[in-house]
Amino acid sequence: MSVAEIKSQADALSFAELSELSRHLRALALRKDPERQAQLSAALGRDVWLSQVEFERAVAELDRSGR
């Protein structure tokens, strides 16, 4: 499906559906952002109080919420 097709079909979605789609697309974009990946890698290398599991869980939650 092309971006143009997604845009044209998005008009038929309800507000809730469009909001869900927006969060999903934002999460996809964030996962592919090289600057964000560099920031996450740098954060993993720091001696912080979060464990790796807690950090990955927090990042996954941010991705799901589209932040």
Image (cartoon, helix red, strand yellow):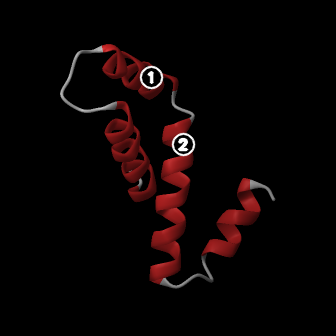
Query: Is 3 in front, or is 17?
Result: 17
Would you name the residue on which mark 1 appears? Answer: 35
Q: Which mark is residue 48?
A: none
Where disc 2 sits, the SS reads: helix
Asked if residue 24 lies left or right of residue 58, the reply is right
The residue where tag 2 is placed is 29
Residue 66: where, in percent of width, then height? 41, 53
Height in image: 14 above or below 63? Answer: below
Quarter residue 29 falls in: top right
Q: Position of residue 22 (x, y in %)?
A: 49, 62
Label 1 environment density (alpha carbons within 10 Å; few <14, some 14–19, many ≥20): few
The residue type indicated by label 2 comes to: Ala
Q: Is residue 37 above or below residue 13?
A: above
* Quadrant in the picture for residue 3: bottom right
Which of disc 1 and disc 2 is earlier in sequence? 2
Q: Residue furthest left?
A: 49
Residue 20: image location, x then y, percent: 49, 70
Count of numbered circles on the image: 2
Can you say whether 38 is above or below 54 in the image? above
Residue lying at 56% horizontally and 47% vertically, measured from the top left: 28
